[in-house]
Image: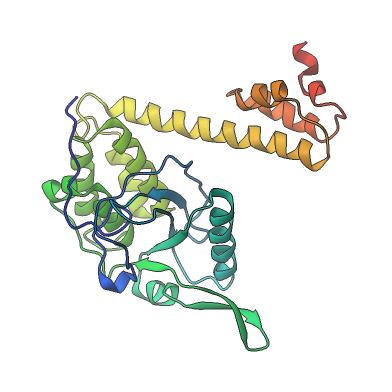
Amino acid sequence: MRRRTKSSGNARSCWIRCSKSSGCRCRNGLPSRSSLRTQRRSGPSNGAWTVLRVKPPSGIGFLLAIESQGRRDADKAVSWAYYLAFLKAKYKCPALLLVVCQDKATADWATGPFRLGAGGWTALSVRPMVLGPGNTPKIIDKEEAAQNLALATFSAMAHGRDPAVDDILDALARALGTADEEDVVFYAEMLESGLGDTRAAKTWRKLVKIHTYFPGRGTLIEETLEQGRVEGQAKERAETVLRMLERREVAVPDEVRERVLGCSDLETLGRWLDRAFTVTNAEDLFEEER
């Protein structure tokens, strides 16, 4: 499999060439992809989260939370503030938010700033970076898309309602056909969740199933994506089991923690989760397996 070297051009943030209108003030240099787990929320109105760890050639690295936003949401500022604070507290690293919108009205609204407080006093202000149809180019050329897969992905997300979206998706699909396996899975999944329940999303799902776009790898892509989803669900369910025990102040020995986190069977984890509500000893989770 041919390995492609990513462009080292003037990329300013989160694997894209940002325009000033996005609000980005990052240093030049191509950041590396995060090893952090991608988090999802269903539906375009709730958004689809992707978290990257940006590592500039110089200076302090930071986390970049990316969310697609389908419409205005009066409660969004609170969840954005909470999520940024959570990332900062959990990973001890500065965090920024990039919101990708499919229409100008939503993009204008998302730029904020959103001030949280009371009595005329601003206790906290949230100001996302925003990409939308007005400041994101339409990439319809395969070679251009291959040079910057992230920008091509954001192009498809931002122009998801544009008549040209089919050409944008076609260029990205063909570009991914020459990319690394890891890149294919990452960008294909991010785009599918970012497009939400739209006609463009249905078109994208059809493209990733066509073997001609991914020579000899069409089935593998689908299997890998499905495996990634199952693994993500298993990890989340395992963490929920442990969290429930901790909330109930049930001591969790290291061997129990390792066994729960090492389980990838969703049905088994489901049984353990049901028991986590009632057991008084963590070992009782495995009652049937003894």
The C terminus - image quarter:
top right
Count the labels in the image: 0
Farthest residue toward the bottom? 120
Left/right of residue 243 with respect to residue 91 in the rendered view: right
Q: Is residue 176 above or below residue 17?
A: above
Q: Is residue 75 above or below residue 10?
A: below
Q: Position of residue 32 (x, y in %)?
A: 32, 45
Left/right of residue 214 with respect to residue 36 in the rendered view: left
Residue at horizontal 40 percent and vertical 62 percent from the top: 98
Q: Is residue 176 above or below residue 47?
A: above
- In the foreground, 217 or 286: 286
Farthest residue toward the front? 59
- In the foreground, 114 or 59: 59
Q: Position of residue 270 (x, y in %)?
A: 69, 29
Q: Position of residue 251 (x, y in %)?
A: 81, 31
Q: Position of residue 261 (x, y in %)?
A: 62, 27
Residue at horizontal 24 percent and vertical 52 percent from the top: 152
Farthest residue toward the right? 280
Residue at horizontal 35 percent and vertical 49 percent from the top: 55
Left/right of residue 172 with respect to residue 49 in the rendered view: left
The N terminus - image quarter:
top left
Q: Is residue 138 above or below residue 32?
A: below
Tell me the quarter of the picture where residue 22 sits.
Answer: bottom left
Residue at horizontal 47 percent and vertical 44 percent from the top: 38
Q: How is the image coloured?
A: rainbow
- In the foreground, 246 or 48: 246
